[in-house]
Image (cartoon, coloured by chain):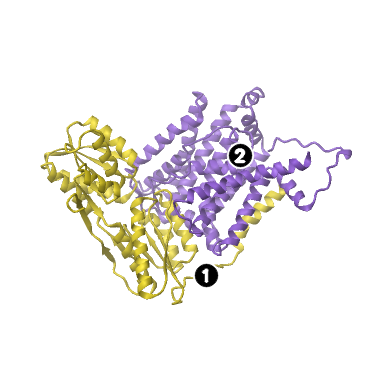
Chain colours: A yellow, B purple
Amino acid sequence: MKTAFAFAAMLTAAPFLTPLAAGQAHAADSSAPLRFVLIPKTVHPWFDKANNGAQAAAAMISQTTGRKVEIEYRAPQTADVSSQNDIIERAIATHPDGLILDLLDEKGNRATMDEAVDEKIPMTVFDSLPPEGMDITAVGADFCEQGTMAAERLANLVGKKGEVAIMMGVPTAPNHTLRAECEKKVFAKYPDMKVVATGVDNDSIETAQKQASAIMQAHPDLVGWVECDASGPVGVGQAIREGGKTGKVKEVGLDNLNDMIQLIKEGVAESSASSRPEMQGYWAVVSAWQRAMGQKTPKYIDTGIDLLTAKSL
Amino acid sequence: MSLETTVPAAPSQQPPKLPPFKALISRLAVNPLGGVVAALVIIFGASCALSPHFLTTFNMVIIARALAFIGLVTIGQSILMILGELDLSVGAIGGLAGVVGGILMVQLGLNPWLSLGLCLLMGGACGLLNGALITQLRLHSLVLTIGMAGVYGGANLVATKGVAITGVPRDITFLGRGLVMGVPVPFLVLLVCLAIVAFVMLRTPVGRYIYAIGSNPDAARMLGIRVNAIRMGAFALAGFLSALAGILMVARLGTAQPSIGDTWVLGPIAAAVIGGVATTGGIGSPIGAVLGAVIIGIIEDIIVLFGISPYWQSVVSGGIVVLAISFDALARRYLNRDAV
């Protein structure tokens, strides 16, 4: 037991006796590759698309400047602020030339971002807003505008009357909550429209499908759906198709996952208010690169929202 | 481990002198914590050798601070496992304590330290409720706590509507973010809690009763041990420690996030098993369980430092955990082969 305690004590003490040995960021060394760490909210196909855009930007910069740019993609396994903070801190420990973050909650991420500031690591955020008072470029689209666009589209499709339902994403995700609030505000404008049910899919296609099927059973007069995350529209679309309600129940989805596009092509979903993840990843890297070069960058880069329809695809 | 009886060997039965390496393996193998310590040393050494970013003060502080939250939950869970019980609602209790703390401090304007105390009491009460339902209704702890996790998690969402509570007073943020002589405060809290619990488990009758109940509850009852009271107390302690982890996380983040505790369910159980706690009860120690949590923490750290693809992370971390568990068994088998 004493031996084990001695080992344990040595391991406990070791961290606090070791000197700082890691190398510093090497942006100033014009020949060394530039290394940026991209940390999304969680593992999800939407962030894969953002990563694709980031890799494209890195290739473009490498080709244009002749200096290699590397993007390291480190995604938390769950959409949890403390897990994301752990990943950010560990990325800081490797002293990259920049951090590109999709913040889960700017207030909850603040303390960890302060550590990056202390370590003089420049940051860029995408698909989210930076903490108040931090001089960081944000790349993204307006979540409220996206929800509003989807809800207005659905309202027009159903003649601004009838029972509709909203599929919430993760109740604790601020962007999902904001979209839901803005969608509710749109429906509240029309006295003949009523939100009769709100499902929670936790960003899971399977859960969205189950919830949507149950809600459509309980509300046979339902005329339409809007959602708040990328998984919800896919699950709701599958439930509409399986329930034989294609055309009777309208759906306006969100984002541009392959399944979503397929549902539009099949006529199950009428359209989708889609952010542009590839463009967000691309411009986040461009901004991070400019920061690493010591240049000033804009406060906000709006990558816009597309309305995807069968015609436009 | 504390119930092991040592029988002195007769002079004629002196074991043969082993070569130094085998002697080291032998000493580690007979030590209840030997396997996990050896696995930890190997993983720690390999990490130092493979990444220049691993053995830095900054990274060690990160590991220590992340360990503190999961470590506190692991202590409570390990005691329950030694008793032959499990509590799958510990994460939900931690999350609920965190948001209740946020409500008390921010929305009701209560003194932060009073709020902290109330949250800890609430966590203990939640754990006690679990224990009372399990012992009085004779329910299986696994099934009951799955249901209670839904109740506590649902209460969290009812209270917050899924929205984080911001504006936590700076008075308590030191508990989550502060450093004392370079050591994160939450890690110091973990060490204090571990020392107290280890003392109780190894040096007091209550600790011996817990091992006895975990080994054979019927026999323990026949010996006059108040089995149900101790089980309820252990559940209350697990709830208390989870609430402590939850409130420390609120202090760390500066906001009361409804998602706090979502990842504290399986990790502590895995840590306890790696640390030598038997899922069948009666064997193991909180120290071993926390060392198991250190192994998991290092694995999570090196996965990021090495830049392993997010899609491979679970495969890699799961594989290393299996290797760590196997190491103990292999070392013992190696020794036993020589002894035969």
Q: Residue at x 27, y 47 (%)?
A: A260
| Dot 2: element | loop
Tell me, yes or no, if residue B147 can be seen here.
Answer: yes
- Name the residue located 65 percent from the left edge and 24 percent from the top edge: B219
Frontmost of labels 1 and 2 is 1
Question: Residue A207 or B263: which is nearer the viewer?
Answer: A207
Please indicate whether residue B43 sits to the left or right of residue B96 in the image: right
Read off the residue under disc 2: B277
| Residue B55 placement, left or right of B244 | right
Could you give the CA–CA distance between mark 1 and mark 2, rounded to whole angstroms? 40 Å
Residue type, numbered disc 2:
Val
Label 1 residue SS: loop
Seen at 52% across and 26% down, the residue is B135
Task: From the viewer's perspective, tell me whether residue B221 is left or right of residue A33.
Answer: right
A190 is higher (above) or lower (below) than A12: above
Viewer can see residue A135: no
Callout 2: 10 Å neighbours few (<14), some, many (20+)?
many
Q: Which mark is residue B173?
A: none
Percent coordinates x, y for residue A215 in the rendering: 25, 33
Q: Amino acid at mark 1?
A: Gly
B8, A46: nearer the viewer? A46
Q: Chain of mark 2?
A: B
Mark 1 and mark 2, same subunit?
no
How far across and down, in percent of the image, does residue A270 sit?
Answer: 18, 45
Q: Position of residue B105 (x, y in %)?
A: 39, 48
Q: At 62% across and 59% down in the image, what residue appears?
A: A14
Q: Which chain letter matches label 1?
A: A
Foreground of the two, B120 or B318? B318
Image spot of residue B48 (x, y percent) = 59, 60
Residue B322's image quarter?
Answer: top right
| Residue, disc 1 | A23
